[in-house]
Image (cartoon, grey):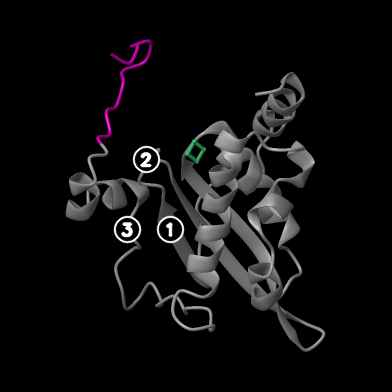
Amino acid sequence: MTDDFQSRVTAAMANPENMGELPNADAIGTVGNADCGDMLRVWVKFKEEGGRKVIDRASFQSFGCETAIAAASLAMELIKGKTAAEALAMRGEEFAKDLGPLPPTKVHCTSLVEGALREALAPVGSVPAPVASPATSAAPPTLMDAFNKPEQKKSGVKVVFLKPGEQPK
Ligand code: FES
């Protein structure tokens, strides 16, 4: 990993934007990478603008590496004002272009961002999935719920929480 790349990721990580759950989101997408165990969820809210339905706000939450978080932070800004189709046309490397050339081992991190957006904006067919109103449904599952799904446990990914100051074994 180059120093340049690491310093750009560190700078993006120092002040990540659009992190956390977006209340009343119109669409939610969650993806995980079975190889590295990282997960990312995005929330998207639309608005009408000039007769088009465009992305008003987007946010993310991640159990992921620094590169995925930095790319997600950049992506949430880049998709504002775009239609779902325009956002879906973007690729992971576009989201992370401000980070510079990605080391080969980090290319999949931007794919995680692209995948979460794809899941939110076109989970089935090409129509963004509406989010049920809070009055008629329970809250969406958290990332922790996703980690605890039986199929996630079968993948061999094990989540271990460390106490403050504790080092991984
Ligand atoms: Fe898995 Fe970055 S190492 S998303």
- Disc 1, ligand 1: is the CB inside 8 Å? no
The local secondary structure at tag 1 comes to strand
Write the residue at 55% across / 35% down.
105
Q: Which mark is residue 141?
A: 3
- Disc 2, ligand 1: is the CB inside 8 Å? yes
Please give left or right for residue 129 compared with residue 8 in the image.
left
Of helix, strand and loop, which mostly describes the magenta segment?
loop
The image quarter in which residue 14 lies: top right
Q: Give x and y (percent) for residue 7.
A: 73, 23
Q: Give x and y (percent) for residue 63.
A: 43, 39
Q: CA distance from mark 1 to mark 2?
A: 13 Å
* Residue 147 drawn above or below residue 89: above
Is residue 120 one of those drawn in magenta?
Answer: no
* Residue 158 drawn above or below residue 23: above
Q: Give x and y (percent) for residue 87.
A: 68, 68
The local secondary structure at tag 2 comes to loop
Q: Give x and y (percent) for residue 28.
A: 47, 65
* Residue 75 drawn above or below residue 119: above
Q: Nearer the viewer, residue 119 or 55?
A: 119
Quarter of the image for the C terminus: give it.
top left
- Marks 1,3: beta carbons within 8 A: no
Which residues fall within the magenta stretch?
Answer: 158-169
Q: CA distance from mark 3 to mark 2?
A: 18 Å
Q: Earlier in the sequence, mark 1 or mark 2?
A: 1
Amino acid carrying label 2: it is Gly
Tag 1: Cα neighbours inside 10 Å, few (<14), some, or many (≥20)? many
Q: Which residue is the site of mark 2? A: 37
Q: CA distance from mark 1 to mark 3?
A: 10 Å
The image quarter in which residue 10 lies: top right
Amino acid carrying label 3: it is Pro
